[in-house]
Image (cartoon, rainbow, N blue to C red):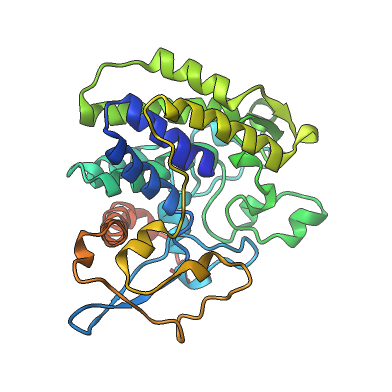
Amino acid sequence: MNIEFHYYIVKYLALKSGFTADEAEIIAYSSQHIDDNSKIYKVKKPDNSFYENYITQTMNLFKPERKLMRMYILFHFLPGDPFNANVRRKDGKMHILMTSKASTHATEIFFDTTRSENLFSLGIASHMLADTYSHQNFVGTYDEINAFSGLYEKLAPNIGHADAGYKPDIPNLIWYDPRLIEENATINNKERVLSAAKKLYRNFLLVTADSNKWSEVKENLKKAIGPQINENKLNLEKQQKKRIHAYKELLNEYGDDNDYDEYKWFRQAINEDVKFLSDRRYKFDPVKDKFSFKDKYKNTNWFKFQEAVKDYQRIATNKLKPILEQMEIKEW
């Protein structure tokens, strides 16, 4: 999934399930920020000690973080059921780390993480669960099982869905996965998105105890996502802009007109001006660029999000320990 689901659709689902506008913003921002939390900051605290965050994504598909391979497995490609019928391949291969939708592991980690009803944790777990739908049939490590054939595919690293490019994340795309048996090879992303949305919506209702309006939610999302398209009709920027406009119209019914700003929470937490971070001409230097927290930093959304990330990683790692101990992942 991309920002369309992780931010806009998640926020809509949260609002429709009874969360307030402020609560829905925290859930949606946390969900999307997993994809943007790609810089390690060493921030000075008021007592002159330093706080360091965990990253949850790398921004260069061709230069993944080998030394932090855990973030792909834990946040984006959670291991599922390698025997699931949907992951059957032409070559008959299986993988213990294969992602499958809403697996037992994913479901247990979701509820273990969100038991406290922490909104930041709810957003983080929502990102993980949604990605089990769009990233199914891939593993979050370097492995030939991820490989497609073709010139571009041979240049891309065999990690996650790098060989498939952006195809798994475009919400109305129908595309072909040549690795799978014919019965599974044609992928309907719209069906996946709606299934993921239904799962998350039901999970949110367990927190809010609101009335179930899924029929209405489903129809509104189907219209916003728009008609299904094939790979030869892709116009990524134009089509995504149109879909986001449709999501915003749904959110406007709740008086929500927020746009996602990946540096908003960080700006609110520190003393320095960080406008330059969004300037592509500038390269962040963690050695030269020093940041310091405001006095009440523990009350800021950025700090709470980062603490929730660490809590999620601890829970997910412990849950997956029996699987990971069977493997020899050198870079973890």
Residue 132, visible in the rendered structure: no
Q: Quadrant of residue 170?
A: top right
Residue 168 lies, with reference to residue 216, above or below; the image says below
Q: Nearer the viewer, residue 50 or 326?
A: 50
Q: Nearer the viewer, residue 281 or 1?
A: 281
Please give the name of the residue rendered at 51% of the width and 55% of the height, measured from the top-left corner.
140
Residue 29 at x, y = what percent? Answer: 39, 47
Task: Residue at 62% x, 23% y: name it.
Answer: 226
| Residue at the (20%, 64%) spot, across then down | 298
Which of the 4 quarters of the picture holds residue 111? top left
Query: Residue 22: x and y, percent?
Result: 29, 40
Image location of residue 269, percent across then percent down: 30, 65
**Image x and y of residue 153, in percent:** 75, 54
Q: Is residue 224 left or right of residue 290?
A: right
In the image, residue 221 above or below residue 92: above
Q: Quadrant of residue 92?
A: top right
Residue in the image at 64% along x and 54% along y: 162
Residue 150 higher or lower than 303, as above or below: above
On screen, residue 136 versus residue 15, left or right, reads right
Q: Quadrant of the C terminus?
A: bottom left
- Residue 238 shows up from this direction: yes
Q: Nearer the viewer, residue 249 or 2?
A: 249
